[in-house]
């Protein structure tokens, strides 16, 4: 009875750690907002006194580009490790919206205690969706040595039974893991609805 309590508390702790890692990654990945100066023009069109600020001419308007549908993938859950080993936990919410010159909107947290890999990152590079299949790539820092790795996550979502959703991750350091969800769900929104 006591060991079941510790297992439950351990799972809650991992979820909290992954959620905190994701929050921290999102906080650090947020783009800086820059406020532009607003020029005030003389509404009457009269000449300004000599030495006064002269507003620059109004820029020629540029055509508004056609909006790309906002694609988003989000999910949270767990899947079993190899041979029924320790569960792997994940949480993510990523979009194909550019927030900096290098990164897209979103954050990803992952934990595999058996392999000593737990991280949260807001460095998302690509998001692709094809029906109920989706993938995203990014960069994370893992371990005490602060090793930088590139990762690719592939998912299947929107299944009639959420436990039919799948999650797969591979990293540039050779780590990989995949499985069918035992808890949670994955939602894929291609932006067309």
Image (cartoon, rainbow, N blue to C red):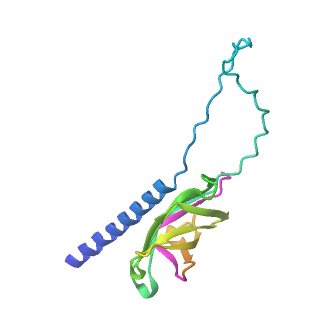
Looking at the image, residue 99 sits to the left or right of residue 113; the answer is right
Most common SS among magenta residues: strand
Residue 190 lies in quadrant: bottom right
In-front residue for pair 140/166: 140
Coordinates of residue 125 in the picture (x, y in percent) = 62, 63
Residue stretch in magenta: 174-193
Position of the N terminus by quadrant: bottom left
Q: Which residue is at the far front?
A: 51
In-front residue for pair 94/73: 94
Q: Count up the numbered dots.
A: 0
Q: Can residue 76 be seen in this view?
A: no
Q: In this view, does 100 lie above or below 75?
A: above
Residue 170 lies in quadrant: bottom right
Q: Residue at x 63, y 53 (%)?
A: 98
Q: Does the magenta stretch include residue 177?
A: yes
Q: In this view, does 50 lie above or below 127?
A: above
Q: Residue at x 76, y 45 (%)?
A: 65
Q: Is residue 119 visible?
A: yes
Coordinates of residue 178 in the picture (x, y in percent) = 53, 79
Coordinates of residue 126 in the picture (x, y in percent) = 64, 63
Residue 135 lies in quadrant: bottom right
Q: Does the magenta stretch include residue 38?
A: no
Coordinates of residue 33 in the picture (x, y in percent) = 56, 43
In-front residue for pair 21/163: 21
Looking at the image, residue 182 sits to the left or right of residue 50; the answer is left
Q: Which residue is at the far bottom?
A: 83
Looking at the image, residue 82 sits to the left or right of residue 100; the answer is left
Q: Residue at x 48, y 70 (%)?
A: 141
């Amino acid at each position: 009875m006591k060991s079941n309590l510790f297992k439950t508390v351990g799972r809650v702790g991992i979820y909290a750690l992954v959620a905190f890692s994701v929050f921290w990654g999102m906080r650090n990945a947020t783009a800086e907002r820059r406020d532009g100066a607003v020029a005030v023009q003389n509404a009457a069109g009269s000449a300004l006194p000599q030495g006064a600020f002269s507003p620059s001419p109004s820029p020629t308007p540029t055509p508004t580009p056609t909006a790309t549908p906002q694609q988003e993938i989000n999910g949270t859950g767990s899947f079993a490790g190899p041979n029924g080993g320790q569960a792997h936990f994940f949480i993510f919410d990523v979009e194909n919206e550019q927030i900096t010159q290098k990164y897209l909107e979103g954050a990803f947290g992952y934990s595999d205690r058996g392999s000593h890999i737990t991280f949260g990152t807001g460095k998302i590079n690509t998001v692709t969706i094809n029906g109920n299949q989706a993938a995203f790539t990014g960069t994370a820092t893992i371990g005490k040595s602060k090793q930088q790795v590139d990762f690719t996550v592939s998912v299947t979502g929107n299944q009639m039974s959420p436990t039919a959703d799948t999650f797969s991750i591979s990293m540039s350091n050779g780590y990989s893991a995949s499985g069918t969800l035992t808890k949670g769900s994955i939602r894929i929104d291609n932006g067309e609805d």
